[in-house]
Image: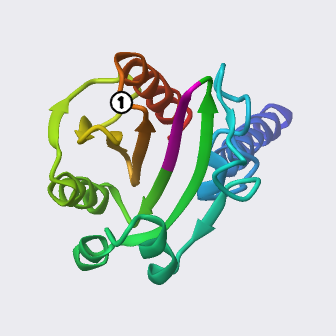
Amino acid sequence: MLRKVSVVFTVSLFVTTVFWVGCGSSDNGEQKSLIDYLPGSGDIQGWTENTDRGEPGPEYTDSVDTATDWVDGAMDFFVESGGWKGVAKEYYISGDIKITLYLHEWADEAAAEKGYQGLLQYHGATWTDVSLGAGEAACSMGKLGSAYRLTIAYKGKYLLDTETEPVTEESEAAAKDFAKAVLSAMP
């Protein structure tokens, strides 16, 4: 009888433990906001927030009107494709190189891919596919004349879009390293 009670107790304890461990969360149950994925000043070696170009700290909006102002009107195809949830932005500087980072959140990866494809068409730049090795589904780099070097990539339900200036060989390498660091920190 004692042996039977011991076995029942052990099995009950095991089932209870598996249940509670399975219900736990590695991030203490907290959902990260989109802003949490933007690097803070100094989080990426050599890069700090560029407060000359915007308000201190990252900004977020889920307003299409505000986002349209931020991205010079490139929101129509995002909204039409469906699934766009919001965008966070921040400005960074490293020496003479400046990067504007836009990080868009979508309902799912399929919607993020539509946004990525739409952005490739919208900019009208000549694109080169690149691999950053950060788990991205796709990444492309291009130039808008001599003004900006563009990097766009998507990973999961997130779309990264950067504008880097000036357009130099040094800024191309910096843009790749920056994008890789941002994407590597994301799920």
Please report the bounds of the magenta region as a residue range. Answer: 96-101
Under circle 1, the secondary element is loop
On the rendered structure, is 100 left or right of 22?
left
Question: Toward which corner of the image does residue 107 lie, by quadrant?
Answer: bottom left
Percent from the top left, x then y, of residue 172? 36, 23
| Identity, as a three-letter code, of the amino acid under mark 1 | Val
Nearest the eye: 123 or 145 = 145
Q: Would residue 172 be visible to someone looking at this image?
A: yes
Q: Residue at x 64, y 26 (%)?
A: 44
Q: Residue at x 32, y 54 (%)?
A: 109
Nearest the eye: 95 or 106 = 95
Judged by its main secondary structure, the magenta piece is strand
Percent from the top left, x then y, of residue 61? 57, 72
On the rendered structure, is 58 left or right of 85?
right
Magenta stretch: includes residue 97: yes
Identify residue for label 1: 167
On the rendered structure, is 107 left or right of 120?
right
